[in-house]
Amino acid sequence: MTLLAIESSCDDTGAAVFRDGQLLSNVVAGQAVHAQYGGVVPELASRAHQQHLLPVVTAALRQAGVDKKELSAVAVTQGPGLLGSLLVGHLFAKGLALALGVPLLTVNHMRAHVLAHFIRDPKPDFPFLCLTVSGGHTQLVRVLGALDMDILGQTIDDAAGEAFDKTAKLLGLPYPGGPRLDKLAQTGNPLRFSFPEGALEGFNFSFSGLKTAVLYFLKKQTATNPAFIEENLADLCASIQHTIVQTLLKQLKRAVQATGLRQVALAGGVAANSGLRRGLQELAKTEEWEVFIPDFEFCTDNAAMVGQSALFQYAAGDFASQLASPDPRLKLA
Ligand code: ATP
Ligand code: FE
């Protein structure tokens, strides 16, 4: 079985090829155009997908050594995401599947982030807990099976990645600020400044208060010392990162206690954060959890995770029809 998977939910255009369950290629084209606006501009994202999709698919097939006539199925992200971006991938995938006369599979992007753990070893066993922390989502998921997941808790406002990006922006760091804030935090004191945590009752999160607290704190400090941010940048980054990481770990610990599940997986782009990785590894040692973190290329948006999800769906006979359409607000469960 040879599968082509396509991802275009936000600002990364991805294509991946699998043969008999093995990943042969995984190509992603990012979009630098958004940096100057400090965030993703939906219309520009759709246009960039239009430009990137054919070259990315062609590169993925070439790297895999696969001709399009050999494909047995085509998979594509159905949602959640930006409608214009999703449409580009969706229409391409539908057209290709129709032309080749092969089945189409539509994939939930957030399920795909979780199933990225099954692309390479080591893989968790079902059931396990997964904390998906990305640019648009923060979800604590109980994964009962590949196609059977429920959300224990999620953010009620900003996502963890958004909290990183928005506070980084307040510090004057260019978009996307998450990775830059992480780097600067490495030489800072995480306990120098204290900001409000975002762990709500139960398993939900709220990160918008952190952004506001940082904004007012910086306003107050720079009123008397205009160089405050510059002089304290590393400590500010480390303290913000510490707050976000502690919030995430607190809810994770609660979820482990409530479910008894001791296999804990991390997914989404924020899984790259060094503070989160370190904090989780340390907690895992004292709490005796088994931790799973995929390679970075499978954490941020990519088509390999979409293909992996589609492989599970293919085995379950979960195919889509040509009437399928993207769903920007598609739910996980
Ligand atoms: P969604 O899946 O919710 O639609 P997305 O797929 O666009 O969102 P990802 O690509 O999974 O999001 O992750 C991007 C996010 O990860 C950005 O907010 C980015 O700042 C953040 N991020 C990446 N690396 C780091 C890091 N080292 N530290 C903190 N945040 C990071
Ligand atoms: Fe994503």
Image (tube, rainbow, N blue to C red):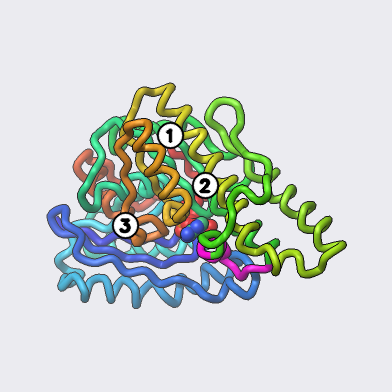
Judge by depth and name the residue closer to the eye, 109 or 200.
200
Which residue does the numbered mark 3 point to in the structure image?
295
Q: Residues within 10 Å of mark 3 (few under 14, many from 20)?
A: some
Is 325 on the left-hand or right-hand side of 100? right
Instruction: Identify the magenta region.
Output: 172-183
| Distance of label 3 from label 1 (alpha carbons) | 26 Å
User: Residue at position x 55%, y 59% from top?
Assistant: 185
| Distance of label 2 from label 3 (alpha carbons) | 19 Å
Say if residue 3 shows up in the picture.
yes
Say if residue 86 shows up in the picture.
no
**Residue 31 painted magenta:** no
Q: Quadrant of residue 41?
A: bottom right
Judge by depth and name the residue closer to the eye, 239 or 312.
239
Does the closest atom of ligand 1 sit within 8 Å of the Cβ of label 2? yes
Q: Where is residue 132 in the image (x, y as percent from the top left)?
A: 44, 44
N-terminal of the pair, mark 3 or mark 1, is 3
**Which element is circle 1 on?**
loop
Which residue does the numbered mark 2 point to in the structure image?
137
Is 59 on the left-hand or right-hand side of 70? right
Which dot, 2 or 3, sits closer to the camera? 3
